[in-house]
Amino acid sequence: MRSTVWSLIALATCLAASTAQAAPQIVHAGTLLVEPGIAPLNQATLIIDEDKVREARPGFLSPEQLGLPAETPVVDLSRQFVMPGFIDLHVHLSSFGDRNELLRRPDEYASLIGARNANTTLMAGFTTVRDLGSIGYSIIALRDAIGNGLVPGPRIVASGDPISPTNGHADNHGMREEVMHALPRRGVCDGADGCRRAVREAVRRGADVIKVMASGGTLDESDAPTDLQFSPEELRAIAETAHALGRKVTAHAHGKQSIIACIEAGFDSIEHGMWADEPILRMMKATGVWLIPTVWPIDYVGTTPEQVRVGPMGKLPPVSLNKVIALGDQPKRLARMAQRLGVKIALGTDAGVYPHGQNAHEFAEYVEAGMTPMQAIVAGTIDAALAGGIKGVGSLKPGMYADLVALPTSPLDDIDAVLDVPFVMKGGVIYKADGIERYPMASPAPIPAWAIKPSPKTAKE
């Protein structure tokens, strides 16, 4: 009976958090970018109703002029550039850094690491992210906790454990056989039927998107090449099953054959795509497959052998270090070629390879690759939402979530403005103002008197 009571209390608390909404409010924006790709408004008013945008109107309008109560809050951003919150389609919030921690820590520890990194990411202006690789339920649980207002963080689209073949990028490597088999291998599958089952199990665990390790990886300790590791039949089975279950499917793919096989299998997007050449990029353009090039990590790690060896990845095992060195500045060349050819590009950064919170550097990489600042912003807002199939985000049009950031200067003049984000709002709730973090957590439901256990003293009396 006592267990049932406390279960009901926990449920009531979650319901209270999930149904709590921000009060109607007004935002005065010095410059307001309602829809990236379309010229912004100067001196505009954004009306927010609960967690969504009601409308945007020219001029700094008062509550009375808008027919709202006089006490309606007015957020003064009249000297700032206001735009939709940023979107990153490729993060790893629960990344440990030290892979040996995986042997010592439970999955719940990964959730707490994820919570810290999620907060850092939100404070950097990223109000929506897609987490493409985590342990068990760690980020799926964090996604739900953020959604219920229990902890601060961006909206999360989660894959959970990636789909990988035996000895693939997401399988266990570099340890005694007994240890490798003892560790969980969720998502590891072989054969078309096995891969269908793995996708179904991922969705059953709560995956919003299916992430597939179609090629080998740079940072794993396998000496397998970074090219095709699944068969074409397995990839088709994965894509067909994911789409039948209403999920997008995206591929970690470096080598040419892995990229081609994923395009032919009907994948929605390619992560990294490092060794794609012009014919492959033209194939992607013709089929409408999105490229998420993850360029910023290569600048963080280094683009020359000398930079890599003295940089943050310099102590990798030799087999991994050599693969990093082989990349050189290929990601930067790829982004330039894809932009020139008109391939659809959406912003994703592989956060976790570099420290979380630096995600916005990817915008500058796209400008360096030939995009205008507006095109780079589109890649990290509207196009990221389209590529990820994420509803309600990417613009500040009526009916969209009130997810916005304010910048001291215009990123349309200098894209580096996105690196300084003093104001963040998500769902109409302010999480950062004047550069200071705020924690407007939902209040827990009160514990009913009948559920409070009497103290021993009270019981005696």
Image (cartoon, grey):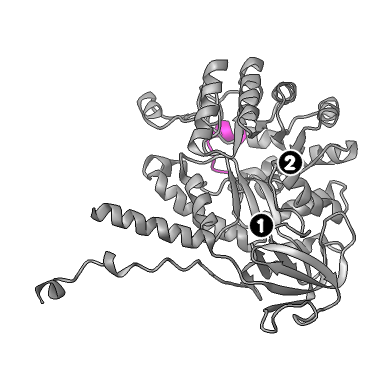
Q: Is residue 81 above or below residue 350?
A: below
The residue wearing badge 1 is: 126
Residue 314 drawn in magenta: yes
Q: Secondary structure at mark 1?
A: strand
Instruction: Give the quadrant of the C terminus.
Output: bottom left
Pick the residue in front: 139 or 168: 139
Q: Position of residue 236 (x, y in %)?
A: 66, 20
Q: Is residue 180 above or below residue 348?
A: above
Pick the residue in front: 199 or 26: 26
Crowding at dot 2, Cα within 10 Å, few <14 / some 14-19 / many 20+, comes out as: many
Could you tell me the amino acid type at mark 2? Ala
Could you tell me the amino acid type at mark 1? Phe
- In the picture, measured across the screen, residue 448 lies left or right of residue 453, that is right
Asked if residue 217 can be seen in this view, the reply is no
- Please provide the residue range marked out in magenta: 311-322
The residue wearing badge 2 is: 387
Q: Position of residue 51 (x, y in %)?
A: 64, 63
